[in-house]
Structures are given as structure tokens and as C-alpha cells.
Image (spheres, rainbow, N blue to C red):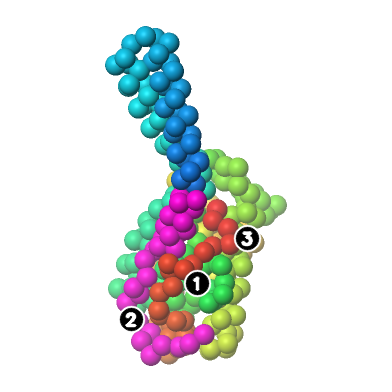
Amino acid sequence: MTTTDKPHSPDRSRAGAGASAKAAEIAREELPTVLLVAALGAATGALLGVLLGHLGLGVLLTVAGGLGAGLWQRGRGAAARWRLGATGERRTGRLLGRLQRRGWTVLHDRRLGPRSRANIDHLLIAPDGTVFNVDSKMRNGKVRYNARRNYLRIGRTSGYQLVSSTLYESERIAATLGREVGPVTVRSVLAVHRAKLPAWRTIEIKGVRVLGARQVRGWLASQAGQPSARGREIASAWPSSPEATASRKVTHE
């Protein structure tokens, strides 16, 4: 890794850019299947129109069948999941961007290395040098949490599934920064969209703090100390050039 002499230069990467690029890539691969399903839907609508013996209704059913089937197939593929993930990252990015006014370094969609398939949704360095890896998640479903058993489940996703990629990323961030500035502790955070987390409970699984996306900025701000030379050193150690379009996450939960 290289260093930069502009520790607080504005980040020019875009939150969710890597996930959006991946979604577009997968969508191109899924297009033949989408078109085939749309054609089958149109054929079904046309057949129904013939059976009903009504030309106008047949045309309408053909168009509706094709569009409906195509959209249904498009919405159930892997590209749709990546598009949803990109939406969550963009929303989190907008929420975290205001911390830059307080002297934070806020980076989005950063690849972990030139040959790595993993990327960081949001990397934040507080003015005092505290480093946070914030991972965006879009989740629906009931939240079940048992602190004593170290158990978390949101909908059909287990806590381990939720935090496994986050922990891997945090380890790599610590290793990368450690080579430049010595030992660094990276704190891991999940920013959860959609699922309603109990505001009165502290949720932490395997050392990862789990928060509703709108709570993250305030919680981060409460964890930071006073600006320091160490903070400036750590902020300058992470490459500032965006690599979002080439990044790919190991798992996009």
C-alpha cells in the first residue's frame, strides 16, 4: 500500500458503486433468461387471448404477460440482490458523509487490495485515529437476539452470516494499516436498513456492533476522542484513490 500526503482530501469514490457495477455485470449475464421468461409469459398471454376469442384482450394479455414475467424474473435474480445492496450502501454513505465536517476521513467502496475480490463498504477514521469498518446490510424480518448465547438472527439470516465478511474485512484493514503505521485496532459495525432493531438494547455479535442505519452516525461520533497526530497519521496511510468500479465483495448479504 502507498501513502498519501492529503489525509483529509475529499473522497471521490461513490458509496455503492462497486455493488452497482456488479449488478450491471450480472444483469447482462441474466438477460437471456429474463428475455426467455418474458417470451414465455407473452406466449401464455397470447394463448389465453386466443382461447377467449377476443383480439384486443389477446394483445393486452400478450403485453402484460411478457412484461410481468420479465419483471418477475429480473426481480428474483442475483442482480436484484446486488442492486438492493447498492441502495443500502448509498443510503449509509449519505448518512455518514456529514462526519467529514467534524474532521473524519470517510471513504466508500474501497478494495482491500489490488488482487482482492473483497471490498469495504465504508471505512471511517476518526480525528483521534479510531478506525471503523461500517458494513451496510439490507434486511427484512424479525430480529432475534440473545446476548448470553451470543445469538442473533434477522429474518432468515444468522448472526454469523451477517458479520463473517465484516470481520474478514476488518482484519485486512488492520493488517494493511499496521504495515504503514504500526498496530491499529479496527472496530466493526453493521448498519442495518429495513429491519427494526430494538433501540433500547445494545446488540453485539462476535465483537461487531449492530445498529439501525440511522443510529450509526451518532454512535460513531460518540466513540471518537480529540484530534491527534496519530489520527492524522492513520488517515494518511490509507490510499485515497477510488477503486470502486473494480471492487467485488466476497459475500453480499
Q: Amino acid at mark 3?
A: Ser
Quarter of the image for residue 62 reads: top left
Quarter of the image for residue 47 reads: top left
Real-space Cα distance between discs 2 and 1?
18 Å
Q: How many marks?
A: 3
Front: mark 1 or 3: 1
Q: Nearer the viewer, residue 121 or 25?
A: 25
> What residue is disc 3 on?
164
First-in-chain label (1 vs 3): 1
Q: Amino acid at mark 2?
A: Ser
Residue sitting at x 56%, y 67%: 117
Q: Is residue 14 magenta?
A: yes
Q: Amino acid at mark 1?
A: Arg
The dot on residue 253 is none
First-in-chain label (2 vs 3): 2
Q: Nearer the viewer, residue 246 or 211?
A: 246
Magenta stretch?
Answer: 1-29
Real-space Cα distance between discs 1 and 3?
17 Å
The dot on residue 9 is 2
Badge 1: residue crowd in 10 Å (few <14, some 14–19, many ≥20):
many
> What residue is disc 1 on?
111
Q: Is residue 178 magenta?
A: no
Residue sitting at x 60%, y 80%: 175
Q: Position of residue 177 (x, y in %)?
A: 54, 82
Compared across the picture, whether 117 is left or right of 234 comes to: right
Compared across the picture, whether 145 is left or right of 200 comes to: right
First-in-chain label (2 vs 1): 2
